[in-house]
Image: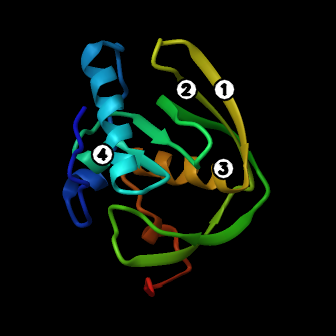
Amino acid sequence: MAVYQVITNPDPVLRQKAIPVEKINAGVLRVLDNMKDTLYAADGIGLAAPQIGISKRMIVVDLGDNLMELINPEIVQQEGVQNGTEGCLSVPGIIGWVDRAQKVTVRFLDREGQDQEIEAEDLLARCLQHEIDHLNGILFIDKASETQRESD
């Protein structure tokens, strides 16, 4: 497959609301495969299609145990609050403290076009919210209570 260059702030594609995927076809599957390769090459845990310059509602997430591919993801329920640090491949060198829901329920389509739903807590919930924000043109620095340069 292919590894894309990750788009960085202030590229305008990161501020656009991504459009829904209308039909899952070979092109969509190829983008998902390339997003996976790009995620692993960048050593990240989540990637949204706008981060590779494609304004479509698709994300990939892997916290180290299995790859998740979500097409047209939507948060349908959330509860609790967690505050933690976040970084972003599109905002290199910056970390910030962001309040997120502790637990979320997300509906999405899988790569076969089947409706799916996942309940996520803690880091997975944080990652899903972060990536879904990308689909709405929101970066973590927009929500951070404080940011700082990442120390090496």
152 in relation to 55, above or below = below
Image point (56%, 79%), residue name? 145
Quadrant showing the C terminus: bottom left
Q: Secondary structure at mark 4?
A: helix
Q: Residues within 10 Å of mark 1 (few under 14, many from 20)?
A: some
**Does the CB distance between marks 1 and 4 fall below 8 Å?**
no
**Separation of residues labelled 1 and 4 (CA atoms):** 22 Å
**Separation of residues labelled 3 and 4 (CA atoms):** 20 Å
Image point (24%, 39%), residue name? 54
**Separation of residues labelled 4 and 2 (CA atoms):** 17 Å
Quadrant showing the N terminus: top left
**Separation of residues labelled 3 and 1 (CA atoms):** 13 Å
Q: Is residue 99 left or right of residue 138?
A: right
Q: Which mark is residue 108?
A: 2
Q: Residues within 10 Å of mark 4 (few under 14, many from 20)?
A: many
> Residue 101: image x %, image y %?
70, 56
Query: Which badge, 1 or 4, is on the more N-terminal residue?
Result: 4
**Location of mark 1 (residue):** 117
Query: Which badge, 2 or 1, is on the more N-terminal residue?
Result: 2
Q: Which mark is residue 50?
A: 4
**Separation of residues labelled 3 and 2 (CA atoms):** 14 Å
The amino acid marked with disc number 1 is: Glu
**Does the CB distance between marks 3 and 2 fall below 8 Å?**
no
Image point (58%, 48%), residue name? 64
Query: Which badge, 3 or 4, is on the more N-terminal residue?
Result: 4
Q: Secondary structure at mark 1?
A: strand
Q: Secondary structure at mark 2?
A: strand
**Location of mark 3 (residue):** 125
The amino acid marked with disc number 2 is: Phe
